[in-house]
Amino acid sequence: MTQGPTTLETPWPVAMLSAKIRDYIDRLGTVWVEGEITQWGQSGGNVYGKLKDLSEDATVSFTVWSSVRAKLTNDFKQGDRVIALVKPNYWVKGGTLTMQVFELRHVGLGDMLERLERLRKQLAAEGLFDASRKVRLPFLPHCIGLVTGKDSDAEKDVLRNAQLRWPAVTFRVVHAAVQGDRMVSEVTAAIKRLDADPEVDVIIVARGGGDFQNLLGFSDEGLVRAAAACRTPLVSAIGHEADRPLLDEVADLRASTPTDAAKRVVPDVADELNRVQQARARLSTRLTGILASEVDRIGQLRSRPALSSATWIIDSRSEDLTRYVARGAELAGRVVERAAAAVVDLRSQLRALSPQGTLDRGYAIAQLPDGQVVRSPEQAPGGTELRITLARGSLTAVSK
């Protein structure tokens, strides 16, 4: 085989390219890797499976030969998080890359809980768990979005209990894997799909409990953030009491089981009708009491003298009017009497002060021709004609 540079005229054979790839990969040696087992199948004592990255969309195949399998002290299955010592092997004949496993260990529960707790604190610091962000569920949802496994007990429990409580309720069910490597992406997509549906009033994510490690997908950061961004009220019904997934923290309501979710989202028609009847009975009793009280009060008012006879006010006012007229006449007579006495007194004073009164007492008034009253002799020298006014009549005279 030629080892020189490749050109259009001197291409490498496929075998040479494959050999170079194998040699390059062999130089990598063994490495420790961490991931989630998404496929675990046995054949002839050997194990063939796939290992998926915990956060990225990356998967590699691996092989556990029977000799190594016999040395493993623990049982492994799909969904387990593991740490593996692997050596990449490139199979020239088939052109495939696989990881030969030399050691395989479960990820310690303490490690997973520590990571989960760090993520929990980070999301809490961002405010994703704040009570102020949680939305009140609608009293009577017309359409419920349900994210759950296909033909699962959780789906049957939610549908049966919800329809028993309120037969008119409708569902928009989106099936998704609730464990395994497809779980996070499918549940996230289902939540976004239902949130975008304007007819969906509330969303339930339901799973009937399970092993803690199988529920770790419900604490995936991407899924939790998608639930936090959901505008439709969301209910988490994962059903794991011991270790609550982060989806429970960010959801608007946490239900202990799928059945509990149905009971808390959908009101019981019998209970509601009973409440309506009780409210109507209380309202009727209250109104009857108010009407009876008002009837009694009106009866008491009508029994009072003021309302028992229609003529009482005329009679009482007639007596008052007679008394006031008599009093007015008496006061008016007194006023007239005092005025008459005053007139007599004033008349006497007037008469005493009038010139006629003076004349009546024998006095006379001497006046010049021009009518001026003579008050001294100098005013009437000799020969002056005078007019003398007496009490009755007048006469003329000449001064000397």
Image: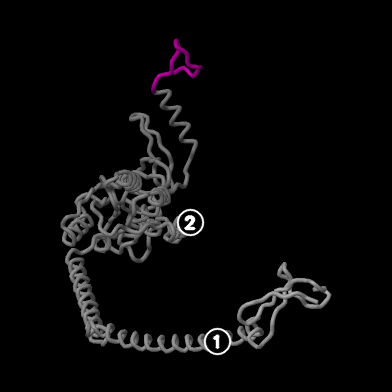
Q: Quadrant of the N terminus?
A: top left
Image-based side of 16 in relation to 349, left or right: left
Q: Give whichever of 59, 354 is nearer the camera.
A: 354
Q: Is residue 204 magenta?
A: no
Give the amino acid type for the residue marked by disc 1 in the picture.
Answer: Ala
Residue 11 on the magenta span: yes
Way the structure is coloured: one colour
Q: Can I make out residue 48 in this image?
A: no
Which residue is found at the position 66% from the left and 85% from the top? 358
- Counting residues from the N terminus, which is met first, the one under dot 1 or under dot 2? 2
Give the CA distance from mark 1 to mark 2: 103 Å
> What is the crowding at mark 1: few (fewer than 14 residues within 10 Å), some, or many (at least 20)?
few
Question: Residue shown at 45%/27% (left/top)?
Answer: 20
Which portion, as a residue range, is magenta?
A: 1-14
For residue 342, the mark is: 1
Relative image position of residue 246 (x, y in whole percent): 40, 57
| Residue 328 drawn at (x, y percent) | 41, 85
Give the side of residue 47 with respect to residue 249, left or right. Answer: left
Residue drawn at (42%, 39%) of the image: 88
Badge 2 marks a residue whose secondary structure is: loop
Q: Name the mark on residue 127.
A: 2
Q: Residue at x 29, y 45 (%)?
A: 198
Please name the predominant secondary structure of the magenta segment in the image. Answer: loop
Query: What x and y, as percent, mark residue 18?
Result: 41, 26
Residue nearer the viewer, 294 or 332: 332
Q: Quadrant of residue 86?
A: top left
- Amino acid type for the residue under numbered disc 2: Gly
The quarter of the displayed image where residue 234 is located: bottom left
